[in-house]
Amino acid sequence: MNIGSDLSFFSLIFGASLPVQLVMLILIAASVISWKFIYLKVKFLKESEENAQEFEKFFWSGGDLAKLYESVSNNSRGINGLAEIFRSGYKEYMGQKEHQAFDKKSIESVRRAMRASYNREIDTLDQHLPFLASVGSVSPYIGLFGTVWGIMNAFIGLSNVAQATLSQVAPGIAEALIATAIGLFAAIPAVIAYNRFATKVDRLSLRFESFIEEFINIVDRKG
């Protein structure tokens, strides 16, 4: 028997038992979805960093905050990140000034408005990260389940054989190991992407928090 001809990658997948095929299908689907989310996340985080840098450039240029607020509010592309946090804070600031003297309570109201906007922006930045974390942590175990099942089938198939040969054992073992390989193929990119994205989100989060405190100091001085 020519083992090499019978142990090609696709022949092992299509020749695997139904439970192992289901495991492989789940892992392949998880991998495809992960790569889709990775692409979307790379694009979104790049845009978020560029938008934050652009907004900070305008904000610290010394221009009128009222004009900046009007420009941000009328942005046809939509607003997010620092621009949205600023919009929420400045809107609350103007509302407080119209209805009462601007004092410590007013400052806290502005801070709460900006914090609420901050939390929404962080939720948006965190989107898809839990899925990548789950794929990265669970996929190896799903693949291991397929491996254990395949090895069990391989040995069960040998129970009625008087003398086991390599050609009889190899297909079942190879089938089992492919499940583990696919599990690792799904998990490794997801883990790398998750760690990379989490770092970028943390940096943006610190950037947002610093801006909130700086804006609070500005409106506190303006009164």
Image (cartoon, helix red, strand yellow):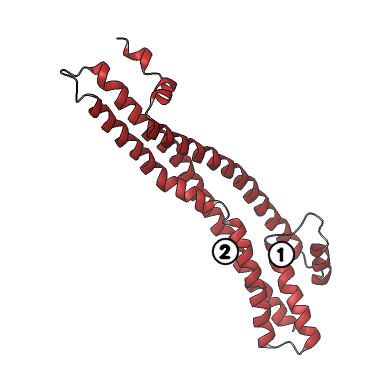
Instruction: Note whether 214 is above or below 109 in the view shown.
Output: above
Question: Residue 48 is drawn in which quadrant?
Answer: bottom right
Per the image, label 2 sits on a secondary structure element best described as: helix
Task: Tell me the amino acid under the disc marked 2.
Answer: Leu
Q: Position of residue 188 (x, y in %)?
A: 44, 40
Instruction: Note whether 17 is above or below 163 in the view shown.
Output: below
Q: Quadrant of the C terminus?
A: bottom right
Q: Nearer the viewer, residue 1 or 66?
A: 1
User: Is 23 situated left or right of 1 in this image?
Assistant: right
User: Is 100 situated left or right of 122 in this image?
Assistant: right
Reading the chain from its start, which is encountered first: label 1 or label 2?
A: 1
Q: Residue at x 25, y 22 (%)?
A: 169
Q: Quadrant of the N terminus?
A: top left
Question: Residue 187 is drawn in which quadrant?
Answer: top left
Q: Residue at x 56, y 56 (%)?
A: 126
Task: Tell me the amino acid under the disc marked 1.
Answer: Glu
The residue that label 1 is drawn on is 84
Q: Nearer the viewer, residue 25 or 100?
A: 25
Per the image, label 1 sits on a secondary structure element best described as: helix
C-alpha span from label 1 to label 2 = 16 Å
Q: Residue at x 79, y 71 (%)?
A: 65
Q: Position of residue 33 (x, y in %)?
A: 55, 41
- Mark 1 and 2 residues: CB-CB less than 8 Å, in contact? no
User: What label does residue 38 carry, if any?
Assistant: none
Which residue sits furthest top? 1
Q: Residue at x 66, y 72 (%)?
A: 114
Instruction: Note whether 148 is above or below 14 in the view shown.
Output: below
Q: Position of residue 158 (x, y in %)?
A: 22, 24
Disc 1 crowd rating (10 Å Cα; few below 14, some 14-19, many 20+) is: many
The residue that label 2 is drawn on is 206
